[in-house]
Amino acid sequence: MKRLIFAVAAAFLLTFAAPAQKSQELLGTRRSSVYQQGTQIRVFSPDVKEPLRLFVISDTHVFLSDEREDPYRQYSKRMSKAYNTTRHFTTGEKTNPEDSFRKTVDLARKDGADANVLLGDMGSDPSEAGVEWVKGVLDASGLPWYYTTGNHDWHYEGMEGSEKELRETWTQERLTPLYHGYDHKLYTVEIKGVKLVFLDNGIYEILPEQLHAFKREMKGKEPKILFGHIPFYAPGYNTNTVAHPDWGYDADYNYKVELRPRWPREGANQTTKDMWKAVLKASSRNNLLASFSGHLHKQQSSVVGDWHQFTVAANCQGGYYEVTIEPLP
């Protein structure tokens, strides 16, 4: 929190007291500044040339089905009822996933966003009707949109198979239309000179090819933002995070409810731990300005070294972030 206050203060000083050429001197080793108020997040960087506005959406948990879902209803029984009626995360008023999603996408359009960014669990399972509905709402908005998978988007509870196998199977069979032809494991797009990096970390573990691709994409000094469904570990975050030191068999309290394999006894593998280190390194050396995730269903933020991380409130309860990446004044 002290580092975040310092970063914001530095940006304030730059705006009112210092010429542009002094910006790096005032900020020290940190090349960006972050300001948050409610659902508004502003990220400032001297390497950003023009403002970029993104609406960040996660955990809508739409459940829609038709006769195509009949063979799979035994696997979607619990989650089909989980979020059909919710309460707005700020007002407490009754809402539901479809209404919340439509309102958020419409707000992004009215506010002139450059793109919608979807961080997974848009559905409660890989229902074809649900995927088609989400895509239809996004396409009708006229805005570009980008997606990465959550831990429910591909998960049919109780279906046999490892999480790696099931994620690959249902991502290919049902979620492909949401990826615009990109590789779900990791892909990047560049908008207004900012590289957006999308990482599928919905099984809590990072594959070697994902780590390799991430390091490759971090080369160069262009500003970057990282997006994934599950947040990475930071002090104070619970064990439902990637690379948490206590993540593993003894910390898995939901495997019986979610009807999935229990987390491994050995905890996070070395590749996952190396990915966490790579994120911290990229934040200090490769101009990774911030990272965003969902999964925890609440607004939360952390600062570790030069790395800023934000989690967004569940969209099924009206949550979203409006993120603006701006030139440093």
Image (tube, grey):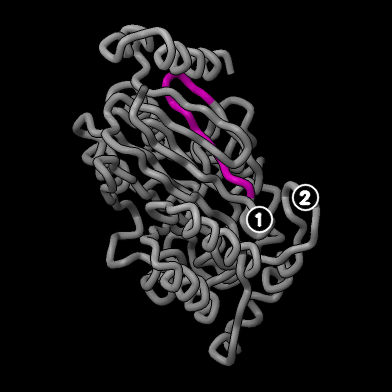
Of the numbered discs 1 and 2, the one sitting upstream in the chain is: 2
Q: Secondary structure at mark 2?
A: loop
Percent x, y of residue 158? 62, 70
Q: CA distance from mark 1 to mark 2?
A: 10 Å
Query: Which amino acid, mark 2?
Result: Thr
Please state if 264 lies on the left or on the right of 216 as rendered. Answer: right
Which mark, by number, is residue 91? Answer: 2
Magenta: main secondary structure equals: strand
From this view, report whether residue 217 is shown above or below residue 89. above
* Left or right of 293 in this view: 95: right
Mark 1: amino acid? Gly
What is the secondary structure assignment of the residue under circle 1? loop
Instruction: Tell which residue pokes out farthest to the front in this image.
Output: 16
Q: Residue at x 36, y 43 (%)?
A: 52
Q: Mark 1, residues whose alpha carbon is within 10 Å: few (<14), some, or many (≥20)?
A: many
Q: Position of residue 216 (x, y in %)?
A: 21, 39
Residue drawn at x 43%, y 60% as measured from the top left: 164
* Magenta region, residue range: 303-313
Q: Quadrant of residue 14?
A: top left
Left/right placement of residue 314 relative to residue 208 reads right
Examine the structure image and report whether residue 304 is included in the region drawn in magenta: yes
Q: Quadrant of the N terminus?
A: top right
x then y, percent, for residue 119: 48, 53
Q: Which residue is mark 1?
A: 318
**Residues at circles 1 and 2 in contact by the CB criterion of under 8 Å:** yes
